[in-house]
Image: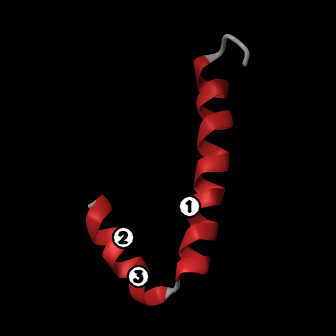
Amino acid sequence: MCGDAIVDLLYLAIPTVLLGAGAFFLIGKDNQKKIVEIFR
């Protein structure tokens, strides 16, 4: 990782968002609502 904090955050955030989106599609719509409520 380079010294730029913003770039470091992007390297961490982008894969996390992609994994999160993939998880939502794999889990299904019924469980999505439960997870959304947990994260709120």
The local secondary structure at tag 1 comes to helix
* Displayed quadrant of residue 10: top right
The quarter of the image holding the C terminus is bottom left
Question: In the image, residue 31 lies at what x, y percent?
Answer: 41, 82
Disc 1 from disc 2: Cα separation? 11 Å
The answer to whether mark 2 and mark 3 are in CB contact below 8 A is: yes
**Which residue is labeled 2 in the image?**
35
The answer to whether mark 1 and mark 2 are in CB contact below 8 A is: no
The answer to whether mark 3 and mark 1 are in CB contact below 8 A is: no
The amino acid on which the numbered mark 2 sits, given as a three-letter code, is: Ile
Disc 2 from disc 3: Cα separation? 6 Å
* Displayed quadrant of residue 3: top right
Q: Is residue 19 above or below residue 27?
A: above
Q: Residues within 10 Å of mark 3 (few under 14, many from 20)?
A: few
Question: In the image, residue 36 lies at what x, y percent?
Answer: 35, 70
Q: Residue at x 68, y 35 (%)?
A: 11
**Which residue is labeled 1 in the image?**
20
The local secondary structure at tag 2 comes to helix
